Amino acid sequence: MGIRFNEVTHEYASYSKITYKAIQNISLNISEHEEFIALVGHTGSGKSTLAKHMNALIFPTSGTVEIFGNIITKKRNKKIKYNSIRKNVGLVFQFPEYQLFEDTVEKDVMFGPMNFKVPKEKAKELALDSLKLVGLDETYLNRNPFNLSGGEKKRVSIAGILALDPEILVLDEPTSGLDPEGKTTLMKLFTDIHKKTNKTIIIITHDMDLVYQYFNRVIVLKDGELSFEGTPEKLFKSNILKNNHLDLPNTVKTLKHIKETLNLDVDIYQKTAEDVINELNRVTKNE
Amino acid sequence: MSIISVKDVSFSYNEKKLGLKNVNIEIKKGEWIAILGHNGSGKSTLAKTLVGLLEPQSGEILIDQVLLNDESAYELRKKIGIVFQNPDNQFVGVTVRDDIAFGMENLCIPREEMLEKIDFYAQKVGMKEYLDKQPSNLSGGQKQRVAIAGILAMHSDILIFDEATSMLDPYTRSDLIEYIKTLNKEGLTIIMITHDVNEALLADRMLILNQGEVYAFEATNDLLKKPEVFRECHLELPVALEVASKVESQKIKEKLWEYVLTK
């Protein structure tokens, strides 16, 4: 089960009749449980296109995507309940304002569950629970989503997907534009959901610090093709970063500088500031 | 002489939502200012009042010694350009060329002169080969460059970046930052709104906003020595400084400070 990409290519047609391959020949397995995946790559590398295939929002130009047993091909298949796929895999877009449309926050978050025939009262409960999960209290229920700040809109759109309780969560740059505290709060929320429910979570990000700190698997795209797959550790120890428009996390960069300028025998691959401090104290203890 | 003077400016969206409260700032020509603050602290509101997109309820703003008001806004907008977070939200042209032309068209610049300028500024931002391409087919960083060319073509001397790098990949981002450094060296005043403290380190001065008020406005290197300010405003410190505050070895502490201050 889960999601399986089998040689998937997606072409977009532009009006100049030149087609443009957003993703090319991608084969990939994502398990239904236990995965916490960072999807990274240069701007325009195909990350968002790949994400949209994960809940059959778009169909492959060639190849197949298997989502919880449903095989998605170029052609629409009447036997497949696309709606139920969207309940299995919840997708939060990059720009939450495109996703919100009701006149109150409560209605917006209730929309998903109601669409799947959840009774109104139950949907209300789910909405409040999900809003609380993302750090918004009941005072938000009757507010107009369009009057919220960017960060708040983002949280409402995430709550809308959480209310559906999907098996797999896919989020397109959920932390971009958030302040450091908001970023940490959201990442802790995702980690928490992942740990408590064992659900697979896939997050698109440009933030190498987050990739190293939180995730257990990284998928790197380059010009629409799969360019790397493995642990964050393996990625940051590789020599493919520059070639893929990526960079080292700040912890590693800082330690690398210290190691080189002071000629210290230190392991530069540390995830958090705390780890960096411990490693440096360990190395200098006997001096 | 200040290129931007903000005098006692207050702005509120409605009774409940405060934007800015008694903001006073002076920015000199050629300075690089970073504006930091948590979500909702008033950063973008300040940027919008500076370009005349929002009108403060009280106080005044002077751009290059000229009072910003309904009559002067049109003229002053030439001097000050803004690049937004999402490059897709600022494109109006079908091709890169049209897009760079847009601002100049509004200023009624003659066609011949406009064509020359388009070439010149496209070359300057490294996008000359792309003039006939559709903006939608460009990468995020390229789009931001086109937006900058359009602003430069209007001879702006102040460039505001409102989280303009937050959607770019690490490489494209540092590429754009390098380019901003060049512009600053050429004398442009840079105002950079950012959540990334590592990016803010490049500024001459940091302006920290908190709940619509100026919490601190000091030379970057001085402000970094006051970590409590960052904590009080819920901002992060560069990893190196967080480590420096707790690591035991004095030698390493010094190296870490040096690493941050020479950025």
Image (cartoon, coloured by chain):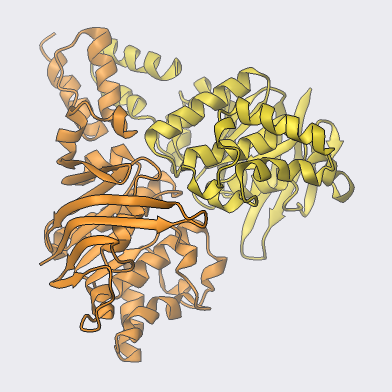
Q: Residue furthest front?
A: A17
Q: Is residue B203 visible?
A: no
Colour for chain A in the figure: orange
Q: Quadrant of the N terminus of chain A?
A: bottom left
Would you identify the image quadrant in which residue A227 lies?
A: top left
**Which residue is drawn at the image coordinates 45% and 51% (left, top)?**
A18
Instruction: State the residue lying farthest toward the right.
Output: B71
Residue B246 image position (x, y, % from top left): 28, 25
Decide which of A280, B113 is in the foreground and name it.
B113
Q: Residue A246: x and y, percent?
A: 32, 33
In front of the other: A253 or B24: A253
Question: Residue A171 vs residue A213: left or right?
Answer: right
Residue depicted at x 18% and y 68%: A67
Give residue B160's position: percent from left, percent from top.
Answer: 63, 37
Q: Visible in this render: residue B19?
A: yes
Q: Residue at x 50, y 30 (%)?
A: B176
Which quarter shows the C terminus of chain A? top left
Q: In the picture, which chain is yellow?
A: B
Question: Would residue B174 appear left or right of A221 to someone viewing this image?
Answer: right
Residue B212 at x, y = what percent? 61, 48
| Above or below B58: residue A101 | below
Give whichever of A230, B259 is nearer the camera.
Answer: A230
Q: Nearer the viewer, residue B157 or A256?
A: B157
